[in-house]
Amino acid sequence: MNKIIRIAKNSSFKGSYSGLGDMELLGNFRGSLKVKNLFIKKTGVFIGAVSAKNIFVEGEIYADIETESLHLKATGIVDGDVFYRNIIIDSGGILKSQMVQNMSKMENLVKLNKKLK
């Protein structure tokens, strides 16, 4: 069974985290993050850089994003450069970005990630 790491409402994390599991963010995260799936709930705020297979945003994310699939919910705000393969923006979702780039294959995302390091 895949465990979910939770950062609770009224809690915060500052730093870098990398793991194979999922993260549910109800509080604040500032830094860099690499996980399988990221769920930013309505009260969640992420600031920094994130790489995840799937990202679901109900809260706020101010970060450069690398993902295979981004789902921006009606209450969500994304502000930062976005590299994605699939994107869904529900009515009401806000996307602010200088660059939104569709990566046709996940391999291209991996190559880009290596170049940025």
Image (cartoon, rainbow, N blue to C red):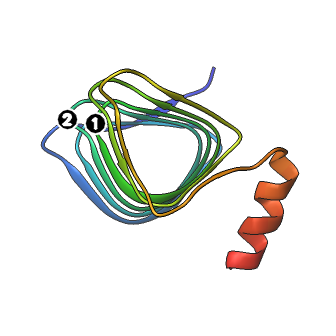
Which three-letter amino acid code belongs to the residue tagged 1?
Answer: Gly
Q: Is residue 92 left or right of residue 43?
A: right
* Quarter of the figure that contains the C terminus: bottom right
Relative image position of residue 31 (x, y in whole percent)? 39, 66
Query: Which image quarter: residue 18?
Result: bottom right
- Residue identified by numbered label 2: 43
Residue at (31, 30) in percent of width and height: 41
Mark 2 vs mark 1: give the one in front: 1
- Residue at (22%, 43%) from the top-left corner? 27
- Tally of numbered tags: 2
In this rendered view, identify the residue nearer to me: 53 or 102. 102
Q: Within 10 Å of the Cα at label 1, are there few (<14), some (14-19), or many (20+) other Cα atoms?
A: many
Vertical placement of 116 versus 53: above or below? below
- Looking at the picture, how far across and down is residue 64, in whole percent? 49, 61
Give the spatial CA distance, label 2 vs label 1: 6 Å
Element type where label 2 sits in the image: loop
State the mark number for residue 18. Answer: none
Residue 51, above or below 53: below
Amino acid at dot 2: Thr
Residue under pointer 1: 59
Please give the name of the residue rendered at 36% of the width and 21% of the height, measured from the top-left corner.
91
Sequence-earlier tag: 2 or 1: 2
On the picture, is 13 further left or further right than 52? left
Q: Residue furthest left?
A: 10
**Residues at discs 2 and 1 in contact (Cβ within 8 Å):** yes
Q: Which image quarter is the N terminus in? A: top right
